[in-house]
Image (cartoon, grey):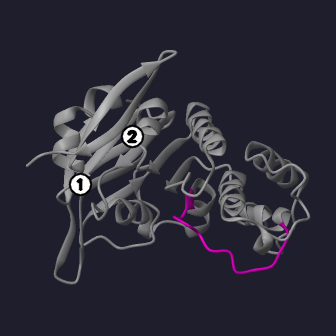
Amino acid sequence: MSAPLIAVHSLSASFGATKVLEGINFAVAAGELVGLVGSNGAGKTTLLRMMAGLLEATAGTITYDSLNISAGDNQARARAIAYLPQAGAIHWAVSVETLVGMGRLPHMGAFGTGTERDRQAVAAAMAACDLGGYEGRTVTNLSGGEKARVLLARALAVEPKVLLADEPVAGLDPAHQLEVMQKLRDLAHAGAGVVAVMHDLTHATRYCDRVVVLYDRSIAAEGVPGDILTPDVLAKCFGVRALYGERDGRSFIVPVDRAEG
């Protein structure tokens, strides 16, 4: 792996007396899509929010280009790292184009004046999320799935070096799930580093270059999905047995029942 864009070093986290993460180490390089997987409560969202600089670690550090992100330039970090929260709420009755354009704020000057480059970035992000014709629509009037695509477009408009996405396909119909996962893969393979929290093991297998499995506050397995998401790992970390298969050269994993024991 090339030099990491973002790296986690011996990271631990607690909420009060409850330990959530302990001794986490992994890194994300340019050009790869990494899936964070694990059962509910495994600490995936907590880890992602710490990588975005939104939560403080109990111990350990997170570095971006060898700098501790909690002590760096906030505007520079905002230009380089985009965070897409899980089920992000939209409270302003603004147009789709206006909301997506907010992704360009870290790049603008003190007076927030947009340039032609900013407008091009917004248009490209909207096209990537299948939002053609949505420019003037009010975001609060959209469906949940449409709002999710608008928020993804806002993150893409940043043109980040690192995109941290928490369940980016939650609430989307199957066709848009495939489109969004392909867009994340394309973004990574164009040179960004992408980390996505996900629950769909088929999406993880098909689109991720690497998966990190969280279990019991630590990393239980890490590597190429086909090598890591084994029956033993699924039984231990997810408590399920699954059907493994392939169609047109694409692998899939479908949980079929609870694992015994």
Give percent across and percent down for residue 127: 80, 44
* Vertical comparison of 17 with 27: above or below: below
Give percent across and percent down for residue 37: 34, 48
Tell me the tag on residue 24: 1
Residue placed most toward the observer, 181 or 46: 181
* Vertical comparison of 189 with 105: above or below: above
Q: Amino acid at mark 1?
A: Ile
Q: Residues within 10 Å of mark 1 (few under 14, many from 20)?
A: some
Tell me the tag on residue 44: none
At a point 66% along the width and 44% down the height, the residue shown is 176
- Does the magenta run of residues contain 91? yes
At a point 88% along the width and 57% down the height, the residue shown is 115
**Distance between the Cα atoms at labels 1 and 2?**
22 Å
Residue placed most toward the observer, 155 or 203: 203
Residue placed most toward the observer, 150 or 113: 150
**Part of the protein shown in magenta:** 82-95
Q: Amino acid at mark 2?
A: Leu
Mark 1 residue element: strand
- Does the magenta run of residues contain 203? no
Q: Quadrant of residue 221?
A: top left
